[in-house]
Image (cartoon, grey):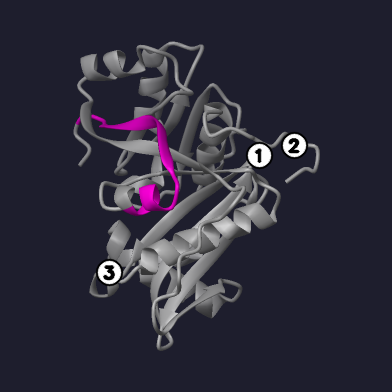
């Protein structure tokens, strides 16, 4: 991250938060710039999270949809609509046969004081800095994000090859008795700390492990000079993030294109 980059100071500054979101997913596969009016990412992997459209503004939505349908043909993908897209995008998509499949609250918290979340008994948190640890990291989030055994090796390779020009990504893995059971990641980019890939093995949930990994990622964001932390919450994670001081500031609505599962 460039030292001259402005740092967001309010949880209600949505544009830096959305730019962080775009930076995270563009790292999975795109040659386009962060500020492109048509922002599309394509990992090439058959996973609905890893391909999609992130923003359309100041251009015809019909043209953008036709382009996306061509470039992402044969892959599962999602269209994200949020506060950085032009008004009316959702109406055009629905008229084109896209199905609304859900929404995720955009939540943000100030990092003046990172909440303390005691480490559950036996939990250690470490940074992912080796290829072996990266494999453990993917294995730990696989069940939370629907990464099946058939995709495991390809996702590990993709993680190892993410673009690094869009921000500083730091991954964390939580271990119980040496076994990787939880993950989180923080992307320091566009003046905010964006949290991603927060997940816990189902057998280890309801122990405060996810909260501990979230708090650890928040602390890293603060260490890197960020004042605001942002994430997109699942229904399961929302109460955890609320207890850690996150507030809902907007939402992202997800659409599935016609004939794509």
Question: Which residue is identified by label 1?
Answer: 191
Over which residues does the magenta segment extend? Answer: 240-258
Q: Position of residue 82 (x, y in %)?
A: 41, 27
The span from disc 3 to disc 1 (Cα, nearest Å) is 32 Å
The span from disc 3 to disc 2 (Cα, nearest Å) is 38 Å
Q: Residues within 10 Å of mark 3 (few under 14, many from 20)?
A: few
Which residue occupies the foreground of this view, 47 or 170?
Answer: 170
Q: Residue at x 27, y 69 (%)?
A: 205
Q: Quadrant of residue 252?
A: top left
In this rendering, would 41 be left or right of 233? Answer: right
In this rendering, would 94 be left or right of 128? Answer: left
Which residue occupies the foreground of this view, 101 or 8?
Answer: 8
Q: Secondary structure at mark 3?
A: loop
Image height of 132 relative to 249, above or below? below
Q: Residues within 10 Å of mark 1 (few under 14, many from 20)?
A: many
Q: Quadrant of residue 101?
A: top left
Q: Is residue 166 magenta?
A: no
First in sequence: mark 3 vs mark 2:
2
């Amino acid at each position: 991250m460039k030292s001259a980059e402005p740092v967001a100071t309010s949880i209600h500054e949505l544009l830096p938060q959305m730019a962080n979101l775009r930076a995270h997913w563009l790292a999975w596969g795109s040659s386009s710039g962060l500020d492109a009016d048509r922002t599309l990412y394509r990992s090439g992997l058959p996973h609905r999270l890893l391909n999609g459209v992130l923003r359309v503004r100041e251009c015809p939505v019909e043209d953008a949809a036709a382009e996306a349908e061509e470039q992402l043909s044969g892959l599962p993908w999602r269209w994200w609509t949020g506060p950085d897209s032009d008004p009316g995008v959702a109406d055009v998509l629905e008229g084109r046969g896209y199905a609304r499949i859900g929404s995720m609250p955009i939540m943000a918290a100030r990092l003046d004081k990172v909440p303390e979340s005691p480490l559950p008994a036996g939990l250690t948190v470490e940074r992912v800095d080796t290829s072996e640890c990266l494999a453990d990291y993917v294995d730990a989030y696989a069940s939370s994000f629907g990464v099946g055994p058939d995709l495991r090796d390809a996702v590990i390779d993709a993680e190892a090859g993410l673009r690094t020009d869009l921000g500083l990504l730091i991954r964390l893995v939580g271990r119980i008795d040496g076994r990787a059971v939880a993950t989180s990641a923080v992307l320091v980019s566009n003046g905010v700390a964006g949290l991603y890939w927060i997940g816990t093995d189902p057998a280890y949930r309801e122990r405060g492990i996810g909260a501990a990994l979230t708090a650890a990622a928040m602390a890293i964001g603060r260490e890197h000079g960020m004042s605001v932390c942002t994430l997109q919450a699942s229904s399961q994670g929302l109460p955890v993030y609320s207890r850690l001081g996150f507030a809902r500031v907007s939402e992202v609505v997800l659409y599935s294109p016609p004939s794509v599962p």
